[in-house]
Image (cartoon, rainbow, N blue to C red):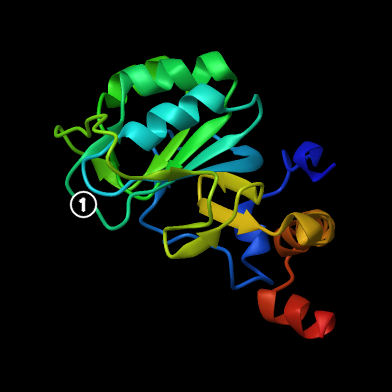
Amino acid sequence: MNAHLDLSDIETATLGHFLSEGFMVPSIQGLAHDRRVFGPALTVRMPGDDGAALVEALSIAQPGQVIVIDRCGDLRHACWGAVTTSAAKARGIKGAVIDGFVTDRSAILANDFPVWCRGRSPITTKPRGLSGDVNVPINCGGTAVRPGDMILADESGVVVLDPGKAKEFCARARQMQQDEIGILDRLQNGETLAQITKRAK
């Protein structure tokens, strides 16, 4: 049920007004700044330069999932590029969130595939088949992610939501975004922010 929860109008920054947990480190940012994706997490744990677990994940992924990759602290190898992008699109994956690096940025953007990562590297992983796991609890960007957790990623960053609480949180965020329209109107009409926040208390 929650896999089909519509978060298309929810902003991570709105959730950040009342939540403090579940947000990945701000250094994980989108390659393109105008994208927003959401969906249940397909988790991957990939240590070092071994890319075998990602090959497996990209072979079993279901349409609508967001692939979330724990690089286990590796700050050298790129695990995502042109080939993985094509494989992900063929499986109907909505986007990728990577606690690490990518390569082939231009090819990823040309394929219009949303990716959030720490940056870029020319050194790539190899399918060694020695380690790694798929669909297990991981840590990505300092945040615990379980298979099926709701992922929301946009221009401000990435948040992980408990599927059992996502509907409640999004309803609150949606109301806050609606209220913000009125606040902006009042500011344009001459009220100060101090006056508005004082009345809100």
- Bin the neighbour count of mark 1 within 10 Å (Cα to Cα): few under 14, some 14-19, many 20 and up: some
Give the quadrant of residue 127.
top left
Q: Amino acid at mark 1?
A: Leu
Q: Residue at x 66, y 47 (%)?
A: 148
Check disc 1 and report the residue beneath it: 75
Q: Residue at x 66, y 39 (%)?
A: 39
Q: Residue 15: horizontal and vertical position, in percent?
A: 67, 61
Give the quadrant of residue 62.
top right
Relative vertical location of residue 119 with respect to residue 168 in this rendering, above or below: above
Q: Residue 136: horizontal and vertical position, in percent?
A: 53, 51
Q: Residue at x 47, y 26 (%)?
A: 58
Give the quadrant of residue 106.
top left
Residue 130 visible to the viewer: yes
In this picture, residue 157 sits left or right of residue 148: left
Q: Who is closer to the viewer here, 186 or 169?
A: 169
Q: Residue 23: horizontal and vertical position, in percent?
A: 53, 62
Relative vertical location of residue 162 with respect to residue 79 in this rendering, above or below: below
Q: Who is closer to the viewer here, 175 or 23?
A: 23
Mark 1 residue element: loop
Q: Residue 27: horizontal and vertical position, in percent?
A: 35, 56
In this picture, residue 60 sits left or right of residue 105: right
Q: Who is closer to the viewer here, 104 or 40?
A: 40
Relative vertical location of residue 54 with respect to residue 198 in this rendering, above or below: above
Relative vertical location of residue 189 with respect to residue 134 in this rendering, above or below: below
